[in-house]
């Protein structure tokens, strides 16, 4: 089980403007994020593999871990640290069975959850961590319904034993309330990609974890 998941950067190349993920991912790793979730759902397989291979190389020798959204095959073939599963992905229990046959006990399985029921099911199925959201209102998560709020985050964090990362509408100022509710850490796209300096943003976020 991962012991230190505080900052999870989720990629979205469409929201990067003039920069690219080839620049942004190494910068995020150098800044000290714990997890990079490569979430490029519409990227062709060949280009996705190139991106993941580059990210894995950038993370080599650092504490950062690379997980690939949905594509277990790509993650395993390129030595990524794990896979992140959504509602349309393979079920976590199926992934866990596949990993058992490959003796990859260190391979991370993350699951996106939108309710306590989702979180309990993910834990039972063998997930190592969950992304719970949206905690706050955010345009990108409108299809998942109203924001869950801090009280629901606290309920989930109390009921599951695996790390819970808060997702959705996360700002620097909202990190502390999430942590006080029991979240292990936070995850997001814009909180990282819109920062003028990823190194400075990581320092701002890390400061919120100091009690």
Image (cartoon, rainbow, N blue to C red):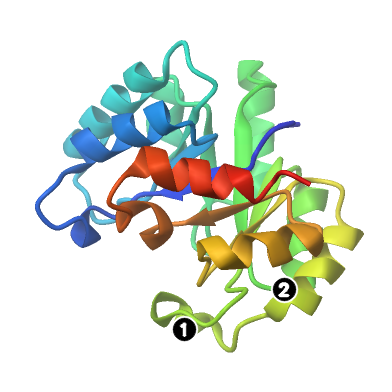
Residue drawn 40% across the image and 43% down it: 200
Q: Which residue is mark 1?
A: 143
Looking at this rendering, what residue extends furthest in the bottom direction? 146
Q: Would residue 165 be visible to someone looking at this image?
A: yes
Location of residue 198 in the rendering, given as x and y in whole percent from the top left corner: 36, 43
Residue drawn 58% across the image and 78% down it: 136
- Label 1, secondary structure: give it: helix
Residue drawn 46% across the image and 79% down it: 138
Q: Would residue 69 be visible to someone looking at this image?
A: no
In this image, 71 relative to 187: left or right?
left
Name the one closer to the observer, 127 or 29. 29
Tag 2 or tag 1, which sits nearer the N-term?
Answer: 2
In this image, 47 relative to 205: left or right?
left
> Quadrant location of residue 38?
top left
Q: Name the quarter where the N terminus is drawn.
A: top right
**Cα gap from disc 1 to disc 2, whole angstroms:** 14 Å
- Label 2, secondary structure: give it: loop
Looking at this rendering, what residue extends furthest in the left direction? 18
Location of residue 16 in the rendering, given as x and y in whole percent from the top left corner: 20, 55
Q: Residues within 10 Å of mark 1 (few under 14, many from 20)?
A: few
Q: Which residue is mark 2?
A: 115
Is residue 29 placed above or below 198 in the rendered structure? Answer: above
């Amino acid at each position: 089980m991962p012991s230190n998941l505080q900052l999870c950067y989720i990629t979205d190349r469409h929201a990067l403007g003039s920069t690219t993920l080839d620049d942004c991912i190494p910068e995020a790793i150098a800044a000290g994020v714990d997890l990079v979730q490569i979430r490029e759902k519409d990227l062709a397989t060949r280009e996705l593999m190139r991106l993941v291979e580059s990210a894995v190389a950038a993370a080599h020798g650092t504490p950062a871990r690379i997980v690939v959204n949905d594509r277990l095959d790509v993650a395993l073939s390129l030595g990524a640290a794990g896979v992140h599963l959504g509602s349309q992905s393979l079920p976590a229990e199926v992934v866990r069975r596949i990993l058992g046959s490959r003796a990859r006990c260190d391979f991370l399985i993350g699951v996106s959850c939108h309710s306590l029921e989702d979180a309990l099911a993910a834990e039972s199925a063998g997930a190592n961590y969950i992304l719970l959201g949206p905690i706050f209102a955010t345009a990108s998560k409108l299809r998942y319904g109203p924001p869950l709020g801090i009280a629901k985050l606290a309920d989930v964090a109390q009921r599951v034993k695996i790390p819970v990362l808060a997702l959705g509408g996360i700002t620097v100022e909202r990190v502390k309330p999430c942590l006080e509710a029991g979240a292990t850490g936070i995850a997001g796209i814009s909180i990282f990609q819109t920062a003028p300096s990823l190194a400075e943003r990581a320092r701002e976020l890390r400061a919120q974890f100091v009690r």
